[in-house]
Image: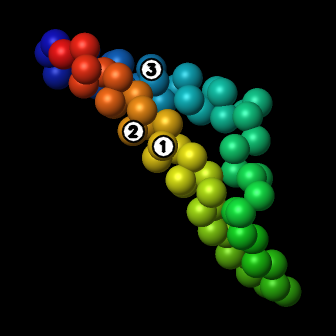
């Protein structure tokens, strides 16, 4: 696959992921910490990061098995 096709594919995947993120409230899982003070908010998406990591690991494992 050439570089322009690869860049277009990555862009399409990011566009689809951004569209789906509107409907899936992934950043509000139990275990994601939010600290709100008077004039600041700190957000630690720990469980969301772990979930995304597990999903991507599974996808890359499956893709690697078919190569």
Q: Residues within 10 Å of mark 3 (few under 14, many from 20)?
A: few
Front residue (pair 35, 32) = 32
- Outermost residue, left side: 2
Residue located at (39% from left, 38% from top): 57
Q: Residues within 10 Å of mark 1 (few under 14, many from 20)?
A: few
Alpha-carbon span between mark 2 and mark 1: 5 Å
Identify whether 37 is placed above or below 42.
below
Q: Quadrant of the N terminus?
A: top left
Q: Quadrant of the C terminus?
A: top left
User: Which label lies toward us, 2 or 3?
Assistant: 2
Q: Position of residue 34 (x, y in %)?
A: 75, 71
Q: Position of residue 13 (x, y in %)?
A: 45, 24
Identify whether 60 is placed above or below 51.
above
Residue 11: in sight, yes or no?
Answer: yes
Q: Would you say 39 lies left or right of 44 here? A: right
Which of the 4 image quadrants contains residue 58? top left
**Residue located beneath label 3 in the image:** 12
Which of the 4 image quadrants contains residue 19? top right
**Residue located beneath label 1 in the image:** 54
Which type of secondary structure does the marked residue at label 2 adopt? helix
Residue located at (68% from left, 75% from top): 42
């Amino acid at each position: 696959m050439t570089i322009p096709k690869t860049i277009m594919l990555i862009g399409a995947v990011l566009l689809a992921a951004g569209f789906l993120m509107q409907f899936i409230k992934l950043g509000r899982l139990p275990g994601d910490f939010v600290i709100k003070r008077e004039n600041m908010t700190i957000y630690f998406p720990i469980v969301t990061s772990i979930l995304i990591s597990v999903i991507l690991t599974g996808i890359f494992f499956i893709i690697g098995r078919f190569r």
